[in-house]
Amino acid sequence: MTAAMTDNAPATPAAGPTAEAGPSRAARATSRLGTTALGLTGIAGFLLLWEVVPRIGLVSADYLPPASQVLVALAERLTLPRLWVALLDTVIGWGLGLLIATVAAVVLGFAVGSLPLLRRLTASTVEFLRPIPSVALIPLAVLLYATDIRSTLLLVVYAAFWQIYIQVLYGVADVDPVAEQTARSFGLGRLARIRHVVWPSALPYVLTGFRLGAAVALILAITAQLIIGSPGLGKEIAVAQSSGAVAAVYALVILTGALGVIVNIGVRALERRLLHWHTSVRGENVA
């Protein structure tokens, strides 16, 4: 059969790619549908288990309300303007902090990474500051900004910055020396080399750091609001907990989880769009 297809290919060159592309698209569509179906099945199974466990008394409903009660509480919360304001506060704190961290990390990362001497000089400082947990800065944030949104931004920027900065350094260091020397031989200046050689090489690293930073930034935004009391979903969770509204606490936790999923999907989509030329994304599309 392989020999026959090879013999017939020159006679019908246009039909070959079309015949191959059709099943490929169909296979990818089927794979996506199968993955989605499995995901929905898993969610349904989890909710069923969650509903049954407190109903049969394995866990007290005072500590783990049935899933149906939590979903009702979530639906009720979604009708309140206060919740949408808190959600907006969380998104603003997360987005603004992530933006500041990204700009600072990219600029400093390219500046430091492009100068080996400067990178060696700052290596010990980076290794000292990077392991400091962001939550350890909460007392400092409260001291400086109290419950203002700037306290949330301080934690978000600090946590996300290191995720992106380290990846940028790796990306700048991973530039092909042959490509760098070729650009020099063609007379490209430093800025032109950064634009045409270093940036395309480092972009996958930058986006990896951005994806990691986006997740960490959301965690720290919620944590800051929960502990400090700055406006947002974290503060709503703390208020629900202090008032004994257990179902509302679970409902708000589910909402923060859904927000995290949306953030991850959005960042992954951005990554695929900006790296459509990269082999890793091409491999994803083919698979």
Image (tube, rainbow, N blue to C red):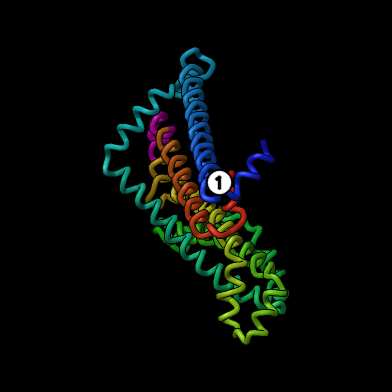
Magenta segment, prevailing SS (helix, strand or loop): helix
Crowding near the residue tagged with mark 1, few <14, some 14–19, many ≥20 C-alpha atoms within 10 Å: some
Locate residue 222 relative to residue 76 in the image: left or right: right
Q: Hey, what amino acid is under mark 1?
A: Gly
What residue is at 43 percent from the left and 22 percent from the top?
66
Left/right of residue 255 with respect to residue 190 in the rendered view:
left
Q: Which residue is most to the bottom? A: 187
Residue at horizontal 42 percent and vertical 56 percent from the top: 93
- Give above or below for 253 relative to 179: above
Residue 62 is drawn in which quadrant?
top left
Question: As displayed, is residue 194 above or below residue 167?
Answer: below
Q: Quadrant of the N terminus?
A: top right
Residue 11 seen anywhere in this rendered image of the structure: yes
Which residue is at 68% across, 79% downward? 182
- SS under mark 1: helix
Report if residue 285 is visible in the image: no
Q: Nearer the viewer, residue 269 or 90?
A: 269
Q: Residue furthest top?
A: 56
Residue 248 image position (x, y, % from top left): 38, 32
Q: What range of the chain is rendered magenta?
A: 239-250
Q: Quadrant of residue 120?
A: bottom right
State left or right for residue 254 relative to residue 194.
left
Q: Nearer the viewer, residue 132 or 16?
A: 16
Residue 84 magenta-drawn? no
Toward the front, the furthest residue is: 11
Q: Where the C terminus falls, by quadrant?
A: top right
* Residue 85 location (% of width, % of height): 31, 48
Residue denoted by label 1: 16
Residue 148 point in image, percent of width and height? 39, 58
Side of 128 relative to 108 (left or right): right
